[in-house]
Image: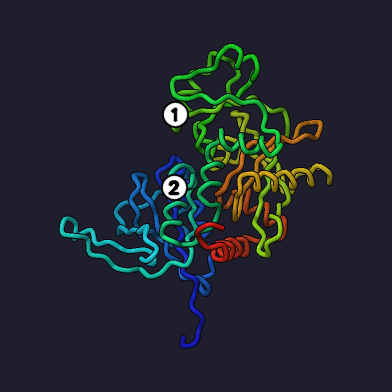
Amino acid sequence: MPGSPRRIRIAVLYGGRSTEHAISCVSAGSVLRALDRQRYDVVAVGITPDGRWVLGSDDPSALAVRDDVLPAVDAAARPVALPGDPTAGGLIALDPAASGQGLDTVDLGDVDVVFPLLHGPFGEDGTVQGLLEMAAVPYVGSGVFASAAAMDKQHMKTLLTAAGLDVGPYVVLRAGQTLMAGERERLGLPVFVKPARGGSSIGISRVDAWDDLATALKAARAADPKVLVEAAVVGREIECGVLESLDGREPEASLPAEVTVTSSAGFYDFEAKYLSDAVRFDIPANLSEEVTAAVREIAVRAFDALDCAGLARVDVFVRPDGSIVVNEVNTMPGFTPTSMFPQMWGATGLEYPRLVDRLVALAIRRGTGLR
């Protein structure tokens, strides 16, 4: 329509090479459903498990869990590329029929902003953020450093500790290493064994007897050769969302939520998160005003300690005495229909479509480069 303002061109990026490929697809489906097509010109871009970029479907129903079957990026779709060249202007579609003769290309047009709904390595860990910085395309979420630091739980804990936050006892094990006797004594039982650079509870095990440690380490190392062994924290599992402020003030924290697991696993594992109803969410968490305020304050401090941008979900434990232990910081939390981050902000008064709008506006305002 003549005279109509140009719609914001947003590329929703999903899938990826990590073990969280399917969860990324489900997150993308939820965001695609929320985007106002009168306001946004949407391009869906999938990354296959082997790393190929393709034009994806922007039909949210194609990215939903059906009968416990997780979605995946269609590897047969038309390939695309995002050149790491700030003069290129955005996405380029490739013609696979021209392979071997110099690929024919079609310019898909400038991209105003990318929403990288990627979880885990090769997406949430600073790698894609670095590519987008090189291409000078604004993107939702934290930059290269914060993304990398938050993804690696060892370095995340180092930064949080430096900021005066309690992270609880842990040991880092590289490939081939196991716990020494003194470390076992210091951590006690039970312990949780997890990949150092993973998410969605993939590869995490609870160990109640040291005879089971080797099996747990093997499961974690299937996802990452570097593993964390953490002492169990007695306390309530609380999550809190953090958003960067649009007006330049300090970040804002959502009302916290509590996760209560009722499954036999005894912790918030992959099945409880995505494939069953063996978990209860209390939003907002039934905490005193004082503890609620402390959780929100600590969530913002953790966000700042890692130099996060845009958004993050901060997971903590509240001990019986009211003290708070930070478990981890997620710079691109899940956006699935059951994900805590959008639910917490909904309870705080920011509904899903407005939440997505805010994240896009923050990304465009922030731009790329040093800031």
The outermost residue toward the front is 370
How many residues crowd around disc 1 within 10 Å: few (fewer than 14), some, or many (20 or more)? some
Q: How many marks?
A: 2
Identify the residue at image location x=58%, y=21%. 207
**Residue 351 position (above or below residue 299):** below
Q: Closer to the N terminus: mark 2 or mark 1?
A: 2
Identify the residue at image location x=44%, y=53%. 14
How many residues crowd around disc 2 within 10 Å: few (fewer than 14), some, or many (20 or more)? some
Q: Is residue 161 left or right of residue 146?
A: right
Mark linked to residue 225: 1
The outermost residue toward the top is 181
Residue 77, image x, y percentages? 31, 57
Q: Nearer the viewer, residue 168 or 14?
A: 168
Quadrant of residue 45 in the image? bottom left
Q: Is residue 70 visible?
A: no
Q: Is residue 314 left or right of residue 56?
A: right
Instruction: Give the CA separation, mark 2 to mark 1.
Output: 18 Å
The outermost residue toward the bottom is 2
Identify the residue position indicated by label 2 in the image.
127
Q: Are marks 2 and 1 in contact (CB under 8 Å)?
A: no
Q: Nearer the viewer, residue 148 or 80?
A: 148
Q: Is residue 123 left or right of residue 209?
A: left
